[in-house]
Image: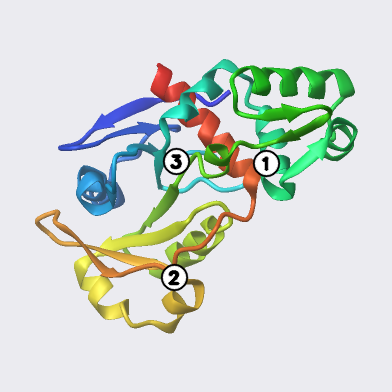
């Protein structure tokens, strides 16, 4: 169970933090970015949810911005381990009960209970003995954006941002303007498809380099994030 330690309230966006915050220069840069999330990333009618230091696998991105479809809220009614089933069905398209039980690595009774719960909330479709995801649930989170914040060690931020691409559609680093102007043409950013946010002394944020959009590769993390968004939205 993920614990929210506090919610930072910026000018236009609240950020749910999953570990205690530390004061310092990086927190100021992070606050500047968080306050402009809507201006930077809002698209269409999907709501945005922003988290800080959200544990995802072995990582903990500084900021995660998630666009979600309204139907995601039903995941608040089921247990987070159902993400393994959703991830498997997202990867294979459809599967019979026996195959799902074998592949997700959970006890048979547990798997059947989770599947029944997912069918009940209409996150999974069932036809005879075959299960699949309705089209909306294949893209229930239209976009996941991660942002790694650093003041000096920008290369470390790029390494972390590159790892985040296993579950994020777009990945950024956010650094002070004087550093950003110096590194904006660095080949490593293009190699990993990382975007660059420049944060000025007056806290304005601009996109110096747009990232390459990709598709999440670890669907379990994708649906775990969806479950967390659902629970936070309900709360």
Q: Which residue is mark 3?
A: 53
Pick whichever of labels 3 and 2 is earlier in the sequence: 3
Q: Name the disc covering residue 87, or none.
A: 1
Quadrant occupied by the C terminus: top left
* Residue 58 location (% of width, % of height): 62, 47
Which is more toward the observer, 10 or 115?
Answer: 115
Q: Along the line of sight, which residue is nearer the eye, 110 or 53?
A: 110
Q: Is residue 38 above or below residue 154?
A: above
Q: What is the spatial separation of the Cα atoms under label 3 and label 2, in whole angstroms?
A: 19 Å
**Residue at which label 2 appears:** 155
Q: In the rendering, at what x and y percent does residue 84 appear?
A: 71, 36
Identified at 73% across, 42% down, the residue is 88
Dot 3: what SS? loop
Residue 83 found in image quarter: top right
- Report whether residue 56 is seen: no
Of marks 1 and 3, which one's residue comes earlier in the chain? 3
Front tag of 1 and 2: 1
Q: Residue at x 44, y 78 (%)?
A: 190
- Within 10 Å of disc 2 (Cα), the crowding (few <14, some 14-19, many 20+) is some
Assign a secondary structure to mark 2: helix
Residue most toward the left? Answer: 202
Of residue 232 and residue 69, the one placed in the foreground of this image is 69
**In this rendering, the label closer to the viewer, 1 or 3:** 1
Question: Whole-Å distance between the Cαs marked 1 and 3?
Answer: 23 Å
Question: Would residue 93 appear left or right of 139 to someone viewing this image?
Answer: right
Q: Residues within 10 Å of mark 3 (few under 14, many from 20)?
A: some
> Does 186 sit above or below residue 49?
below
Q: Secondary structure at mark 1?
A: helix
Residue 72, image x, y percentages: 48, 29
Q: Mark 1 or mark 2, which has the lower sequence index? A: 1
Which residue is the extreme one toward the front? 128
Q: Quadrant of the N terminus?
A: top right
């Amino acid at each position: 169970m993920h614990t929210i330690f506090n919610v930072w309230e910026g000018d236009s966006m609240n950020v749910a933090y999953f570990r205690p915050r530390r004061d310092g220069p990086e927190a100021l840069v992070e606050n500047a970015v968080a306050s402009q999330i809507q201006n930077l990333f809002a698209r269409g009618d999907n709501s945005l949810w922003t988290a800080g230091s959200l544990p995802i696998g072995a990582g903990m991105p500084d900021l995660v911005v998630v666009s979600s479809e309204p139907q995601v809220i039903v995941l608040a009614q089921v247990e987070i381990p159902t993400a393994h089933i959703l991830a498997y069905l997202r990867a294979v398209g459809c599967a019979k009960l026996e195959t799902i039980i074998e592949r997700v690595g959970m006890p048979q009774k547990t798997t059947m209970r989770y599947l029944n719960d997912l069918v009940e909330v209409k996150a999974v479709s069932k036809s005879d003995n075959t299960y699949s995801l309705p089209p909306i649930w294949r893209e229930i989170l239209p976009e996941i954006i991660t942002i790694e914040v650093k003041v000096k060690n920008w290369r470390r931020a790029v390494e972390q941002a590159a790892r985040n691409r296993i579950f994020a559609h777009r990945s950024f680093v956010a650094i002070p303007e004087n550093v950003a102007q110096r590194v904006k043409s660095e080949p490593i950013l293009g190699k990993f498809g990382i975007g660059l946010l420049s944060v000025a002394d007056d806290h304005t944020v601009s996109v110096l380099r747009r990232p390459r959009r990709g598709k999440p590769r670890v669907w379990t993390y994708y649906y775990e994030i969806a479950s967390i968004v659902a629970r936070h939205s309900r709360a």
